[in-house]
Image (cartoon, helix red, strand yellow):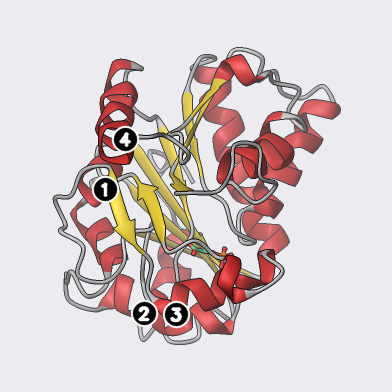
Amino acid sequence: MEIVIVPDAAAGGELIASAMAELVTRKPDALLGVATGSTPLPIYQALAAKVRGGALDVSRARVCQLDEYVGLPTGHPESYRSVVLREVIEPLGLTEASFFGPDGAAEDVAAEAIAYDHALAAAGGVDLQLLGIGTDGHIGFNEPCSSLASRTRIKTLTQQTRVDNARFFDSLDEVPHHVITQGIGTILEARHLVLLATGEAKADAVAATVEGPLSALVPASALQLHPHATVVVDEAAASGLKLADYFRATYAAKPAWQSI
Ligand code: PGA
């Protein structure tokens, strides 16, 4: 894994946006897997600024979802489809035609999840998958003890995740209990995984992901299995890393083949 320690969230967003811009310049129809939550917003803002400034053309890029709540009505403002349309698709000047994800309001959720897994493969696979990390170590909505080989499927959220996400809803009761999430095995098929974590609350999960054992208890530790995984953390999220100085030195001397 490549660990990059940045001063703050804005610097992490800028760094990752630059890597995405480089990818899209090299491969204009790249499939970009986007994540929701608060953490990736600086990435999308930095990317949109490049597009607005004329430095980047993303018009042929494709965008796909990492996960989705189950049971919210179609068009609900906190459905992840709505969030991605608002935070990514519209600011980048893309249209809905370039964006796909699982339908959390589908009648047969299990079939929808399998169909989405197949749709990702049919689209040629994800070129770069953005990830956040839960305080419990989840990636996507793969909660602790998810199979490290799991495919896209329905999952039940932990109470911790529902509490963490209640800020987006009027009350905890409104946070769905179920989700469709790309499985860990599905996520690992993306060509490049980029996880951004910011803030003290993520320090323990980051340390367990990067320096702990590979464990289903910490789903993000599955990134240790990926040949091209980048973990970008601010100083606060890096505060639990024993090898922080080594990571700083390694990144400062990074070889040319590294993409971030
Ligand atoms: P957050 O969510 O960015 O809002 O902290 C991250 C996650 O749950 O994956």
| Residue 135 appears in the rendering | no
Q: Count of labels shown?
A: 4
Q: Which mark is residue 183?
A: 1
For the residues labelled 1 and 4, say whether their Cβ atoms are less than 8 Å apart.
no
Q: In terms of sequence position, does the residue under pointer 1 or pointer 4 come before the other?
A: 4
The amino acid type, in three-letter code, at marker 3 is Gln
> Where residue 68 sits: x, y (%)?
47, 46
Q: In terms of sequence position, does the residue under pointer 4 or pointer 2 come before the other?
A: 4
> Which mark lies nearer to you, 1 or 4?
4
Question: Up-down: is 91 above or below 121?
Answer: below
Q: In terms of sequence position, does the residue under pointer 4 or pointer 3 come before the other?
A: 4
Left/right placement of residue 154 relative to residue 68 reads left
Residue at position x 34%, y 50% from top? 229
Q: Residues within 10 Å of mark 2 (few under 14, many from 20)?
A: many
Q: In terms of sequence position, does the residue under pointer 2 or pointer 1 come before the other?
A: 1
Could you say which quadrant of the image residue 12 lies in?
bottom right
> Which mark lies nearer to you, 3 or 2?
3
The residue where tag 2 is placed is 207
The amino acid type, in three-letter code, at marker 1 is Gly
The residue where tag 3 is placed is 160
Residue at position x 57%, y 72% from top? 173
Could you say which quadrant of the image residue 90 lies in?
top right
The residue where tag 4 is placed is 108
Question: Up-down: is 106 above or below 45?
Answer: above
Badge 2 element: helix
> Where residue 124 sits: x, y (%)?
32, 18
Left/right placement of residue 72 relative to residue 68 reads right
The amino acid type, in three-letter code, at marker 2 is Ala
